[in-house]
Amino acid sequence: MSEIVDCSQWGAAAQPPDMRCEVLVIGSGCGGATAARVLAQAGRRVIVLEEGGDFVGPGRLTQRDLAMYDQVYADRGGRTTACRSISVLSGRVLGGGGVINACDVVPIADETWATWRKYFGIDAFSASDIAAATQRALTDLSANPIAEEQVNKNNQILRRGSQALGWRGELMRHNRVDCKGLGSCLIGCPVGAKRNPRMVSIPLALQAGAQILTRARAEQIRDVRGRQKTVTVRCLDAKGYREGATFRVIADVVILAAGPVGTTTILKTSGLGSAALGRFVSLQPQIPITAVMPEVVNAFDGIPQAYAVTEFERHDDQRGLTGFRIEPIFGTPGVIGSLVSEPGAAGKALMAQLPHFAAALLLLPDEPLAQIRRNWRQQLRIEYQFTEDYRSRARQAIQAAARVYLQAGAQVVAVPTCPALTIRSERDLAQIDKISLDPATLPLISAHQQGGARMGPDAETSVCDLDGRVRGGRDIFVMDTSVFPTTSSSHTMAPVITMAHLLAGRLAAHWPQTAS
Ligand SMILES: Cc1cc2nc3c(=O)[nH]c(=O)nc-3n(C[C@H](O)[C@H](O)[C@H](O)COP(=O)(O)OP(=O)(O)OC[C@H]3O[C@@H](n4cnc5c(N)ncnc54)[C@H](O)[C@@H]3O)c2cc1C
Ligand code: SF4
């Protein structure tokens, strides 16, 4: 079995040796780990580069907000859109987003595949290929229904209120096994209960001979049209703060799986990609909402997200998934403190009631209209446009969530707008229509970035062909959420694992023709 090599051992003065492989995978998250494992098991010599560190083992995922956001999130959890309206969260750790996500398993719906086929020309996968890849993803995740005894008070309250209103909802599937209900999923599971890429595909890839390099950031692909590509790699120090030595990896095939921001950045730096590169990005901005209940909720205790209100989720033939869903959520006190509606003393008084808080996220699929760019100083800019459709669904979603909590007996429902909005009875609901959703007036959260290197048959509107191959390069592929033409699902982990199985499986099967 190969080992994980920590590149932080090489400081600025070191000269690490160049490396050679058949397949270089950039990014070890849900897409990258799956692709690496499929190709290593098919007998290819695989190297994986991961910018983050490895956080498996005793005392590494510590349940401490500050240390964990600093170490396992991209830009230390501080990445935002250019307008500062949306916090753009993604993992930066061996195993990627799977290490820090909420474990909800929702595959790509048949209706979404139908929309992609009809309006986006994604007709390269047969129904049986899709079914088999979806099943592989569910098996990788050990997907299983959340048991009734695992539904904590926070989730029970949402279910109670929505069922009293007669609204449809469901207990979700998740990828936890032997979960101890510690509740810190969003900053990593300290007892290894998540069947995420770090626990499943990475060990399998290692077993099949893949080599994995951590604290290794891919910077540029050179010789993009050559049989052999050279990728320049920058070593980072143990905490990922400072840059160290550089070295090169020479590969026949390069697979980008660095997430929409990482993948777009590398392709731009390498002079690859059509005019569509960095465009057609969905962020799925989610709205946090808090309620103060008469009873003690202790929402930080147990699985954060177990029950979803699905009453308002819709499939639009042309646009795909739309509407909204309501899902409970909770975080550590530091995170909740940053989301309460009131500032100063009023906020402090609100936080004193933390054990009585119930909280939810309102999840709204959006149109893929965001763009990932670099400004003239080469700094990252994520530009977002709020459509009238998004604003109107956002107000409907806030209304619906406020009604659920009032129905469940909430004393106060707090919407963290600026200025703050506090709802105490049905009479106050009309105020929601006045929420402007102007830039930076609501702390929106994006956990499901998709697009940027979209796949499709048309070179004008897509970056990759239907095999995931980047146009204009030779044997350079994308296998992460960047390839999705519109939002794939309300939750993107199972979809991207499915897509990686489809694309990497095809590459493995057609290897001699593609990379020769
Ligand atoms: C807080 C949070 C909660 C979520 N909850 C859920 C959920 O409950 N259910 C669900 O289905 N989905 C959830 N998601 C989304 C899901 O985790 C992601 O969609 C999924 O991880 C995306 O997979 P990926 O392979 O595209 O990218 P990622 O998993 O993000 O992996 C990309 C990897 O590439 C690395 N990288 C970036 N640039 C470079 C570079 N230049 N060189 C080397 N490495 C690089 C990054 O460090 C990262 O590890 C959540 C996400 C977040 C952030
Ligand atoms: S609830 Fe706790 S034990 Fe269960 S997966 Fe999340 S962090 Fe791990």
Image: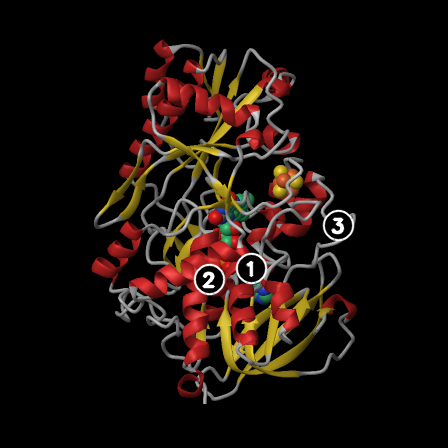
- Disc 2 Cβ-to-ligand 1 distance below 8 Å: yes
Q: Which mark is residue 462?
A: none
Where does residue 32 sit, x and y in percent of width and height?
Answer: 53, 65
Residue sitting nearer the eye, 83 or 410: 410
Q: Is residue 399 above or below residue 109?
A: above
Helix, strand or loop at label 1? It is loop
Q: Which mark is residue 60?
A: 3
Alpha-carbon distance for marks 2 and 3?
26 Å
| Side (left or right) of 72 relative to 326 | right
Callout 2 amino acid: Asp
- Give the mark, 1 or 2, whose residue is nearer the N terminus: 1
Q: Which mark is residue 29?
A: 1
Where does residue 135 sit, x and y in percent of width and height?
Answer: 43, 57
Q: Is mark 2 in CB contact (under 8 Å) with mark 3?
A: no
| Side (left or right) of 393 relative to 49 | left
Question: What residue is rendered at 71% in x and 54% in y?
Answer: 55
Q: Is residue 334 above or below residue 383?
A: above
- Give the mark, 2 or 3, whose residue is nearer the N terminus: 3
Residue sitting nearer the eye, 264 or 379: 264
In this view of the protein, can residue 338 be seen by the observer?
Answer: no
Callout 1 amino acid: Gly
Q: Which mark is residue 480?
A: 2
Q: Which quadrant of the structure image shows residue 189?
A: top right
